[in-house]
Amino acid sequence: MIDKISAWNNIGFATGSMFGPIIGGKLKDEYGYRQACDIICVVALIGAVLNLIISVIPEIVCGKSK
């Protein structure tokens, strides 16, 4: 499980480093700084919940051990 989480972390970091400033700048220009931060926060929360549902909960329920 640690390897899978590490891989997803690396993918997310690289993708965020590439597209984050572009998307963040566009959101800031369109909605202003405060609303852009709110939008980014909601998207990050949705991503965390999806990660929990897809990766962590099945690992706990199935009880896979090393």
Image: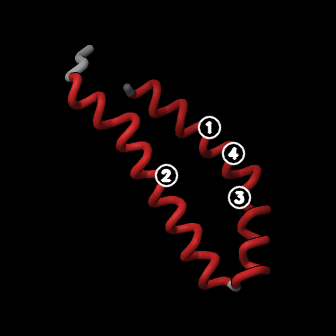
Q: How many marks?
A: 4
Disc 2 or 4, which lies upstream in sequence? 4
Image location (x, y in percent) of residue 10: 59, 37
Answer whether labels 4 and 3 touch (C-beta < 8 Å): no
Disc 3 or 1, which lies upstream in sequence? 1
- Which residue is painted at 74% across and 63% down in the image? 23
Answer whether labels 3 and 2 touch (C-beta < 8 Å): no
Note whether 56 is above or below 34 in the view shown.
Answer: above
Query: CA separation, marks 3 and 1?
Result: 13 Å
Residue type highlighted by circle 4:
Thr
- Which disc is residue 24 wearing? none
- Which residue is painted at 79% across and 62% down in the image? 22
Q: Quadrant of residue 34?
A: bottom right
Q: Nearer the viewer, mark 1 or mark 2?
A: 2
Query: CA separation, marks 4 and 3?
Result: 8 Å
Q: Quadrant of residue 15?
A: top right
SS category of the residue bearing label 2: helix
Note whether 51 is above or below 62 in the view shown.
Answer: below
Residue type highlighted by circle 3:
Gly
- Horizontal side of residue 54 vs 29, given as left or right: left
**Residue labelled with disc 1:** 11
Display colour scheme: secondary structure
Answer whether labels 4 and 1 touch (C-beta < 8 Å): yes
Residue type highlighted by circle 2:
Gly
**Residue labelled with disc 3:** 20
Disc 3 or 2, which lies upstream in sequence? 3
Note whether 63 is above or below 22 in the view shown.
Answer: above
Residue type highlighted by circle 1:
Ile
Q: Nearer the viewer, mark 3 or mark 2?
A: 2
- Which disc is residue 47 wearing? 2
**Residue labelled with disc 4:** 15
SS category of the residue bearing label 3: helix
